[in-house]
Image (tube, grey):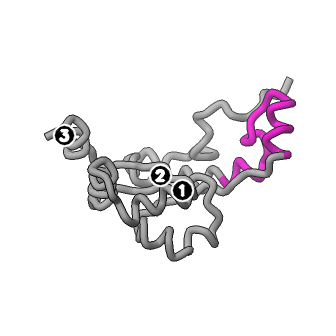
Amino acid sequence: KDLYHEICEMADYIFFVAEPDLHQLLKVAHPLTQKERKLVSYLALEKTRIIGNKFSPALLKHEIVEECFGDKVLTALASYEIEDVFESQLNSSTLLSSRNYYKELEGIMKEIAELLLPNQLLNQKKSSILSGFRFRKSES
């Protein structure tokens, strides 16, 4: 057994982050090399979940994406407006400084946290699942 296989056996969950790259998706749908077949075998494990990066809700429902990932997609991050990314960089802040993005990411992170964290920690009175992170620009 290789090291990756042993690690996968020990893990409770395996997360892959995937992007909507048609060429790469076709490698998952129709693996040709040994390396591609090994990746597909990891994707087939019950404990595997996919986090989509730059996936729109419509793209998640596309037949190629569904063929590749089936019901393995846990959550997805949409593409962010390039102007918003530029402005946040210009202002030395993050997209989480914006209330809209903060709320959106809070929902996405909650889906992941519900798998990984015990209920007693999730049910604590906190303002947000992201409240432990210092993403917001400090008010001075």
Q: Which residue is mark 1?
A: 52
Q: Which residue is mark 2?
A: 112
Q: Which residue is mark 3?
A: 6
Could you tell whether 5 is left or right of 136 in the image?
Answer: left
Residue occupying the far left of the picture: 1
Horizontal and vertical percent position of residue 20: 57, 58
Q: Are marks 1 and 2 in contact (CB under 8 Å)?
A: no
Q: Quadrant of the C terminus?
A: top right
Image point (21%, 43%), residue name? 5
Q: Is residue 21 above or below residue 62?
A: above
The verdict on residue 88 being magenta is yes
The disc labelled 1 sits on which kind of residue?
Answer: Gly
Could you tell whether 22 is left or right of 41 in the image?
Answer: right
The disc labelled 2 sits on which kind of residue?
Answer: Ile
Horizontal and vertical percent position of residue 86: 83, 38
Tell me the mark number nearer the camera, choosing from 3 and 2. 3
**Which residue occupies the foreground of this view, 75 or 53?**
53
For the magenta stretch, what is the residue range? 83-104
Horizontal and vertical percent position of residue 48: 34, 55
Q: Secondary structure at mark 3?
A: helix
The disc labelled 3 sits on which kind of residue?
Answer: Glu
